[in-house]
Image (cartoon, rainbow, N blue to C red):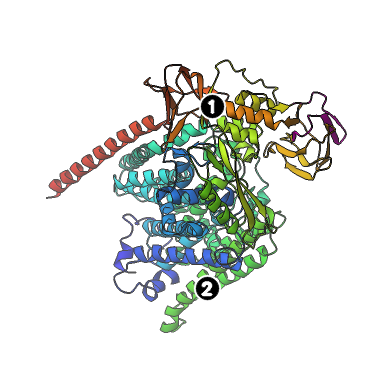
C-alpha cells in the first residue's frame, strides 16, 4: 500500500487478529498495487472524491430510470417535498436576493405574518441551501434536486473519509462503502424527499471523526466547529447523529489499541478521550445556540400535533427493509446493498479481526437495532417525542454502523471462506425470514439474488487472486480488480433498482404536487401586478401544491411549517379557515368577511384548464379582483365581547369585525342528508362544516366539495350560492362517510351590512401604514381611543407602543396583535423579535469564549510538549 494510506490511522497496531497482520488477501495486497492512485492524489483523498461522484451518479441514474424530473416528465414533489420544502427553498432564494417584504425575523408572505428565523433553522440553515441562488426563479425544482444530490455526495465522501481514518485498506472499497452509506434505504426513502434531514446523514460520519480526534487528543478547535455546523445545518438529525457518534466513540474507546501499558493508564486515557469529546460537543452545541434556542422555543408555542404512541413493527418487516426494492415510512429503511450487508455479517466470524473489535462492533450493531423497536430508546432517539409519521428517522445511524462493520471485516482483505460461509448463511436466513413481509416488492428477491450471486463471484475471484502459487502473476494482479468491478457493480445495480422502485411506489401511494409550471407563473405575474403591500394584502388563492404564497408571492393566509404557531392555527380555524397537517398548514379562505378582517384587497382566482397530472405542467386561467377593505391597522372599542367556546365561525367573524353581517338562521335543521333554513332573499349562503367530507349542494346551484378528515384536515367555510326570492334554503349533502356538522353550519351573508362595516373601519382606521422587515407603523386619526388592532396573529415575540410610550409585549385582540389607545397617541408601532434571541446569543458568546480558551490551552500544551522534546 502507498505510504499515505498506511499513515491514515494513528493507532492500528493490535486491531488485527488471527495472523491478519502477516497475511493480507486479494483486496488489500493486490488492489494496493493495481489500483494505487497515480500522481499526487493519496488514497485518503481519492476515496472521498470517488465516493462523492459515484453517489451522485447513482442517485441521478435512479431518478432517470423512474422518469422523474429533472430527467423525465414526472413530478418528484411527493408529500412535504412539494407542499413544504420546495416552497421554502423558492422563498429562500428570493430572500437571499432581497426580493421579499420580510427579513430573517419575519415572513410577511405566509400566515398573515409568520416568524421566519425558526423556519430558517428548521429547513434552510444548511450551507448547501445557499446553492439555490445559482439558479433562476423558474428552475427552483432543479435547484432543490441539485442541493439534494450534493448533500448525498457529501455524505458519501464523509463516510469514505471516516472509513480510511479508522483503518487503512483498499481505497476503492472504502469509496464503494461510502456510496452505500450515502444511498442507503433511509436516503432513498426518506432523506431524498426530506432534504434537510440529509444534513444529519452528512453529520454522522463527520461527528464520528470528531470523536476520533477527541480520542487521540487532536483538533480541539476544529471538532467543536464541526459539531456547531452540524447542529446549525439541521439540529433535529444532528441530535440523532450525535447519539450515534457517542455509540461509535464508546466502541472505539473500548476496542482501539492504546499506547499506554497499564490498565490504570489505559483507563485514564479513555476517560480523557470521553471528556474531550463531551467538551467539544457542548461547545459546538453552544456555538449553534443562537439558532437552536430559537427553534426550541418556537416548538413550545407551535400548534401541537396529536400524541403518537410508538408501536414497533413486526420483525419480519424490519428484516425485509434490509433487502432491495422495499419502501415505506412505517418501518426502518435499512437497505445498504446486499454485498455491503454480507460483509457486515461476516465480521463476527472473521478471525483476521481482533476479538474485541469483532465483539464491540457486533454488539453496537445489535443493540442499536434492538433500540429501534423499544419505546424508551425510541423516545431517546427522537428527543423524547414520538414523531407523527416516519417513526424510524434515526435509521441512518444504524446504516452507518453496519458499513463501519463491513469495512473492519474487509479492510485487511476478503474474509476467509469460513467467515464468508457464516455471513452468507446469516444473509440467507434474513432473507428467508423476511419473505412474508408486506414491504416485499416484486423486484426485491430478483435483485437480491442477482446481487448476492455477483458478490459471491467477486469474493471467489478476490481470494483466487491471492493464490499466487496456482495463478500466473498477471492474472493474480487483475483478478482482484475484476472482483472489485463485480462488487461495485452489484452494489450499484441493486441501489439503482431500489431507488427506481422507491420513486415509483411513492408517487403511486402518497399525496403529490405537480411540477411548477404555467399555472404558478401566471399567478405570480398577477400577484406582482396587484401587490400594494402594506396598503392592503394580495392573496394568491389556490395554486396546486402548498405554501402557495412562498412560490407565487402575495401575503395570504397559507403557511405550512412544523413551527406554525398555535395562535395562528387556532385563530384562523376559529374564523372558518381550513387546514391540513393536523392544523399546521392553514390554507386560504375566499370569504369577503375574512378579506375585510385581514385587509385582503386583491384576490387571485385560478381555474384549471385541464386535469392536474403527475407527468404534465399544470395550466390554468388566472384572474385577479380587487375589493375595498379596511387598512392593516384598525381601531376597535375596548368593550368587545370575548368569544365563547360554543360560538360558530360566523359569530367569531362578526365579533372580530365589530358588526353583525350574517343572518344566522335559528330554525336551521338537518333531516337525514338535507339541511333546511330560512334567510333573507339575495343573501349569500355560506356552509361551515370543518369535519365534513363530501359535497353540499344548494337547491338550484352546483355541488361544492368539502374535504374534512379530522384530525388531519379541516375543511374551510365555503359559499354555496344565493338565497332565492322565497327565502328557502335547502342544502343536500352527499357524504363519503358519516355526517359531522357543527351546531350552526349555515350563515347567510348580507352584503350591504358588510359594506357598511368596511366603510366604518376604514374611516376610523389608520390613515397610513408602513412596513419594515419585521415591523409595522401606523398613523391614526387624532383622538383615537380603544384598541388599535393589527391584522397579524399575535404570536409570541411582538412588542408594541402607542405614540412615544416604551415598547411592551403586545396585547391580544381575539388572536390578533393589539395596542391600547388613550386618545392622545396618533401613531402605533410594533416590531417582532424571535423569542430566545438574547438567550441564544448569550450562550453562543459563552461558547465562543470557551472555544478561544480551548485553542489557547491547546497551543500552550503543544509549546510545552515541544520544549520538553527539545
| Relative to 603, 145 lies left or right | left
332 w.r.t. 679: above or below: below
796 w.r.t. 126: above or below: above
Residue 397 showing in the rendered view: no
Instruction: Estimate the x, y position of residue 304 in percent, counting from the top left.
Output: 59, 32
Residue 703 showing in the rendered view: yes
Residue 474 included in the magenta stretch of the image: no
The residue beneath circle 1 is 763
Labels 1 and 2: the sequence-earlier one = 2
The residue beneath circle 2 is 486
| Relative to 563, 223 lies left or right | left
Which corner quadrant of the image does residue 45 belong to? bottom left
Q: Give the magenta part as a residue range.
A: 664-685
| Relative to 404, 321 lies left or right | right
Residue 667 included in the magenta stretch of the image: yes
| Relative to 225, 642 lies left or right | right
Amino acid at each position: 500500500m502507498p505510504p499515505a494510506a498506511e499513515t491514515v490511522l494513528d493507532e492500528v497496531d493490535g486491531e488485527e487478529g488471527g495472523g491478519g497482520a502477516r497475511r493480507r488477501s486479494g483486496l488489500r495486497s493486490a488492489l494496493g498495487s493495481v489500483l494505487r492512485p497515480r500522481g499526487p492524489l493519496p488514497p485518503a483523498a481519492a476515496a472521498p472524491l470517488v465516493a462523492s461522484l459515484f453517489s451522485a451518479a447513482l442517485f441521478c441514474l435512479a431518478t432517470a430510470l423512474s422518469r422523474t424530473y429533472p430527467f423525465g416528465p414526472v413530478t418528484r414533489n411527493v408529500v412535504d417535498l412539494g407542499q413544504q420544502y420546495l416552497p421554502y427553498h423558492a422563498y429562500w432564494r428570493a430572500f437571499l436576493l432581497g426580493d421579499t417584504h420580510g427579513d430573517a425575523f419575519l415572513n410577511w408572505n405566509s400566515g398573515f405574518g409568520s416568524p421566519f428565523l425558526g423556519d430558517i433553522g428548521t429547513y434552510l440553515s444548511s450551507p448547501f441551501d445557499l446553492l439555490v441562488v445559482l439558479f433562476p426563479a423558474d428552475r427552483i425544482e432543479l435547484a432543490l434536486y441539485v442541493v439534494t444530490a450534493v448533500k448525498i455526495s457529501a455524505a458519501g465522501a464523509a463516510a469514505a473519509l471516516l472509513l480510511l481514518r479508522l483503518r487503512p485498506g483498499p481505497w476503492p472499497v472504502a469509496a464503494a462503502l461510502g456510496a452505500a452509506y450515502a444511498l442507503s434505504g433511509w436516503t432513498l426513502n426518506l432523506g431524498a424527499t426530506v432534504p434537510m434531514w440529509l444534513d444529519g446523514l452528512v453529520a454522522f460520519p463527520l461527528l464520528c471523526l470528531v470523536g476520533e480526534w477527541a480520542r487521540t487528543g487532536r483538533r480541539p478547535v476544529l471538532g467543536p466547529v464541526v459539531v456547531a455546523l452540524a447542529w446549525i445545518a439541521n439540529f433535529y438529525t444532528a441530535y440523532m447523529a450525535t447519539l450515534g457518534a457517542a455509540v461509535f466513540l464508546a466502541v472505539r474507546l473500548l476496542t482501539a489499541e492504546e499506547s499506554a501499558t497499564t490498565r490504570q493508564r489505559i483507563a485514564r486515557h479513555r476517560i480523557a478521550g470521553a471528556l474531550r469529546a463531551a467538551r467539544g460537543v457542548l461547545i459546538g452545541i453552544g456555538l449553534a445556540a443562537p439558532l437552536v434556542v430559537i427553534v426550541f422555543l418556537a416548538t413550545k408555542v407551535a400548534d401541537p400535533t396529536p400524541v403518537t404512541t410508538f408501536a414497533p413493527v413486526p420483525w419480519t418487516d424490519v428484516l425485509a427493509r434490509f433487502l432491495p426494492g422495499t419502501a415505506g415510512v412505517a418501518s426502518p429503511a435499512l437497505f445498504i446493498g446486499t454485498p455491503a450487508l454480507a460483509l457486515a455479517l461476516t465480521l463476527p466470524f472473521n478471525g483476521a479481526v481482533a476479538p474485541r473489535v469483532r465483539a464491540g462492533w457486533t454488539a453496537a450493531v445489535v443493540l442499536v437495532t434492538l433500540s429501534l423497536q423499544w419505546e424508551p430508546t425510541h423516545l431517546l432517539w427522537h428527543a423524547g417525542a414520538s414523531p407523527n409519521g416516519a417513526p424510524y428517522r434515526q435509521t441512518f445511524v444504524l446504516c452507518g454502523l453496519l458499513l463501519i462493520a463491513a469495512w473492519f471485516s474487509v479492510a485487511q482483505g476478503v474474509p476467509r471462506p469460513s467467515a464468508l460461509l457464516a455471513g452468507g448463511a446469516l444473509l440467507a436466513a434474513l432473507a428467508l425470514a423476511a419473505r412474508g413481509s408486506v414491504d416485499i416488492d416484486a423486484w426485491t428477491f430478483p435483485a437480491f439474488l442477482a446481487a448476492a450471486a455477483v458478490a459471491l463471484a467477486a469474493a471467489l475471484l478476490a481470494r483466487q487472486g491471492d493464490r499466487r502459487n496456482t495463478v500466473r502473476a498477471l492474472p493474480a494482479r487483475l483478478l482482484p480488480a475484476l472482483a472489485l468491478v463485480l462488487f461495485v457493480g452489484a452494489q450499484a445495480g441493486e441501489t439503482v433498482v431500489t431507488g427506481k422502485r422507491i420513486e415509483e411506489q411513492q408517487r403511486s401511494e402518497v399525496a403529490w404536487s405537480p411540477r411548477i409550471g404555467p399555472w404558478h407563473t401566471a399567478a405570480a405575474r398577477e400577484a406582482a401586478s396587484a401587490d400594494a403591500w402594506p396598503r392592503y394584502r394580495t392573496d394568491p388563492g389556490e395554486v396546486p401544491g402548498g405554501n402557495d404564497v412562498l412560490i407565487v408571492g402575495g401575503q395570504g393566509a397559507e403557511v405550512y411549517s412544523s413551527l406554525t404557531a398555535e395562535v395562528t392555527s387556532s385563530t384562523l380555524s376559529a374564523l372558518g379557515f381550513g387546514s391540513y397537517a393536523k392544523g399546521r398548514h392553514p390554507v386560504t379562505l375566499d370569504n369577503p368577511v375574512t378579506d375585510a378582517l385581514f385587509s385582503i384587497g386583491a384576490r387571485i382566482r385560478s381555474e384549471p384548464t385541464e386535469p392536474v397530472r403527475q407527468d404534465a405542467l399544470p395550466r390554468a386561467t388566472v384572474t385577479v379582483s380587487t375589493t375595498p377593505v379596511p387598512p392593516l391597522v384598525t381601531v376597535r372599542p375596548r368593550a368587545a365581547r370575548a368569544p365563547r367556546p360554543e360560538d360558530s365561525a360566523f359569530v367569531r367573524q362578526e365579533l372580530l369585525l365589530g358588526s353583525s353581517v350574517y343572518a344566522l338562521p335559528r330554525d336551521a335543521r338537518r333531516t337525514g342528508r338535507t339541511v333546511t333554513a330560512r334567510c333573507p332573499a339575495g343573501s349569500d349562503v355560506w356552509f361551515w362544516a370543518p369535519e365534513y367530507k363530501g359535497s353540499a349542494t344548494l337547491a338550484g346551484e352546483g355541488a361544492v366539495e368539502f374535504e374534512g378528515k379530522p384530525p388531519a384536515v379541516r375543511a374551510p367555510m365555503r359559499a354555496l350560492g344565493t338565497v332565492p326570492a322565497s327565502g328557502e334554503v335547502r342544502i343536500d349533502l352527499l357524504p363519503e362517510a358519516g355526517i359531522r356538522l357543527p351546531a350552526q353550519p349555515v350563515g347567510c351573508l348580507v352584503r350591504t351590512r358588510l359594506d357598511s362595516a368596511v366603510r366604518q373601519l376604514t374611516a376610523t382606521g389608520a390613515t397610513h401604514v408602513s412596513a419594515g422587515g419585521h415591523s409595522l407603523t401606523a398613523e391614526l386619526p387624532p383622538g383615537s381611543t380603544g384598541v388599535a388592532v393589527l391584522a397579524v396573529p399575535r404570536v409570541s415575540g411582538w412588542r408594541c407602543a402607542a405614540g412615544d410610550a416604551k415598547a411592551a409585549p403586545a396585547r391580544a385582540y381575539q388572536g390578533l396583535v393589539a395596542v391600547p389607545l388613550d386618545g392622545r397617541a396618533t401613531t402605533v408601532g410594533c416590531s417582532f423579535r424571535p423569542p430566545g434571541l438574547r438567550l441564544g446569543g448569550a450562550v453562543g458568546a459563552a461558547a465562543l469564549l470557551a472555544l478561544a480558551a480551548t485553542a489557547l490551552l491547546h497551543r500552550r500544551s503543544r509549546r510545552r510538549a515541544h520544549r520538553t522534546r527539545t
